[in-house]
Image (cartoon, helix red, strand yellow):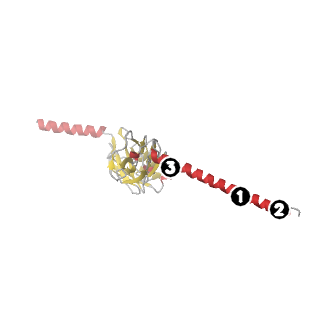
Amino acid sequence: TKTQQHSAQQQHLSTVWSAVAAIQVDIPQDQYEFARGDNITLPCTFKSALSNPILAVVSWSIVGENVIITHYHPNGVTEIKPEYEGRVSVEANINGGTGKADLKPSSITTADNKKYECQVQNPKDNVGKDADTTTLTVLVAPSKPICKIEGTASYGQNVSLTCVSEEGSPPPTYKWNRYDVQNNSGAFPPKTTEKEGTLFLYNLTTETSGFYICTSANKIHSTSCNLTVTVLPPSMMNIGSTAGIIRGAVAALILLIVIIYCCCCRKKDNDKENYAMAPL
């Protein structure tokens, strides 16, 4: 019957597929995210065309760098690079033609932000996909940013406000906000530009004065710092300059009076001495 013929064909195709099937290595996700300090697992599974492989070599490496760990089946020997000793292990389990080869890093740091490759090799099953990759991102909240002003906040001048967090993973983004002297949220002065945490203020006026807040944020947390910008009007600057000149002139006049007084006193003392020594 047609049904029997179809069933026979399926069995035949299944037999052929089993004969030609190749190794398939798979990491479920392209990227994994964990918090700094965690003990984690990067999973790796595989299927082999061999129902009972005599030998299998499982290895994890950092793409473009070096092999971290190598595990040999069936003797169970595991080799770890010295710099990773005590920090990583592999959980390998080969059951027939399927298995897993999970990498287990401990106490992860931002130095572990890498792309990793899992590879499974069977000497008699070298056709197919014997490796897969994934990226590890170690999450760290941004540190409190440091805010600085570069330049002199004088009328008509240009300054830049910088904002930098020393750490954060993924790298934090920065956003500036401004509040005027009445503590009302407001727009930035004309021509203001913002780039990578730096706010550029041009042609300062009294309207530029205010309270500037920078927020550093990533998907973990956000934190902020602030600066107060005070720009004096030209009249106040002139008054300040005039007052400085007057103060300098007064100080010079006082010094001159003191010098004249000292000279007069010395002259009187000399006159008295000369009078006392004069012959009678």
Residue 116 percent coordinates (x, y): 40, 46
Amino acid at dot 2? Tyr
Q: Earlier in the sequence, mark 3 or mark 1?
A: 3
Q: Secondary structure at mark 2?
A: helix
* Amino acid type, mark 1: Cys
Which mark is first along the chain, 2 or 3?
A: 3
Binning the other alpha carbons within 10 Å of mark 2 as few (below 14), some (14 to 19) or many (20 upward) gives few
The amino acid marked with disc number 3 is Gly
Mark 1 lies on a secondary structure that is helix
Compute the Cα span from label 3 to label 2.
Answer: 53 Å
Q: Is residue 275 left or right of residue 175?
A: right
Q: Which residue is mark 2?
A: 275
Residue sticking out furthest to the right: 279
Residue for badge 1: 262
* Quadrant of the image containing the N terminus: top left
Residue at the disc numbered 3: 240
Distance Cα–Cα, label 3 vs label 1: 33 Å
Q: Foreground residue, 62 or 146?
A: 146
| Residue density around tag 3, few if under 14, some if 14–19, many if 20 or more, within 10 Å | few
Residue 278 placement, left or right of 2 = right
Q: Is residue 51 left or right of residue 84?
A: left
Viewer-closest of 175 and 46: 175
Q: Can residue 92 be spotted in the picture?
A: no
